[in-house]
Image (cartoon, grey):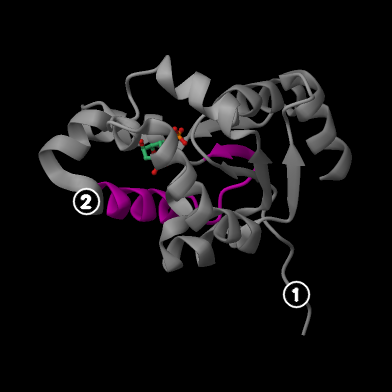
Amino acid sequence: TVASPRPLNIVLVGFMATGKTTIGRILSKKLGFQFVDCDHEIEKQQGMKITEIFKTQGEEAFRQMETDFLQSLASQSKLIISTGGGVVGRQPNREILPTLGYVVWLHTKKQVIFDRVMSNSNRPLVQTEDPMGTIKALLKVRKPLYKEVADIQIKTHKLTFDETAEGIIDTA
Ligand code: S3P
């Protein structure tokens, strides 16, 4: 049997604030692929910000929305798909992600993540008394999961967003 070719999408995974949306937009321009931001699409569908979805429907409901949204992308091509940082927590998502395309794990330092999340209020999971502690704990759980789904890992802290995008294009 002949293996069917992989769909021609690039899927960006990684922790909150690692640049998935910014780099996704740059890749979209450079490659002429359509940019799809999972969080943003879910917000549009629900007519609510992520923080409100978490408050009114809970995290589990949000996770189901993520799974449903990823499934809706199957068989599409020429997309740059930016995922939410927690998408790898669910086994079904870890199965779907690699089927959608070339999976790139964007990685940066904890301090960079901390500085970026503190300047953005739409991240319910780090609205705790100890955001750095929360970041560390989540990273510990998630790192092996990003690794499991990703084709490549890119360490971004010494790179500009543009250099990161070029690096992805070179390896894809
Ligand atoms: C989450 C990350 C967010 C968003 C939600 C949950 C997470 O996306 O999906 O707040 O669990 O890490 P970003 O990675 O774009 O911040």
Ligand 1: give its quadrant. top left
> Is the Cβ of the residue at disc 2 closer than 8 Å to that at disc 1?
no
Residue 84: which disc? none
Q: Is residue 113 above or below residue 69?
A: above
Instruction: Using residue 72 as the reference point, say whether residue 166 is left or right of it.
Output: right
Count residues near mark 1 (Cα–Cα under 10 Å), then give few for <14, some for 14-19, many for 20+.
Answer: few
Q: Residue at the spot x=39%, y=17% of the render?
A: 120
Check the image and name the residue furthest to the bottom: 1
Q: Relative to the observer, which residue lies in front, 125 or 29?
A: 125
Q: Is residue 64 magenta?
A: yes
Label 2 vs label 1: CA separation?
35 Å
Q: Is residue 78 above or below residue 87?
A: above
Instruction: Using residue 86 as the reference point, say whether residue 148 is left or right of it.
Output: right
Q: Residue at the spot x=65%, y=26% of the render?
A: 23
Element type where label 2 sits in the image? helix
Q: Residue at the spot x=44%, y=33% of the render?
A: 132
The location of residue 8, given as percent across then percent down, is 70, 48
Q: Quadrant of the N terminus?
A: bottom right
Q: Quadrant of the C terminus?
A: top right
Check the image and name the residue furthest to the left: 56
Residue stretch rendered in magenta on the structure: 61-82
The location of residue 49, given as percent across then percent down, is 26, 26
Q: Is residue 84 visible?
A: no
Amino acid type at image mark 2: Ala
* Disc 2 target residue: 61
Q: Is residue 108 visible?
A: yes
* Disc 1 target residue: 3
Amino acid type at image mark 1: Ala
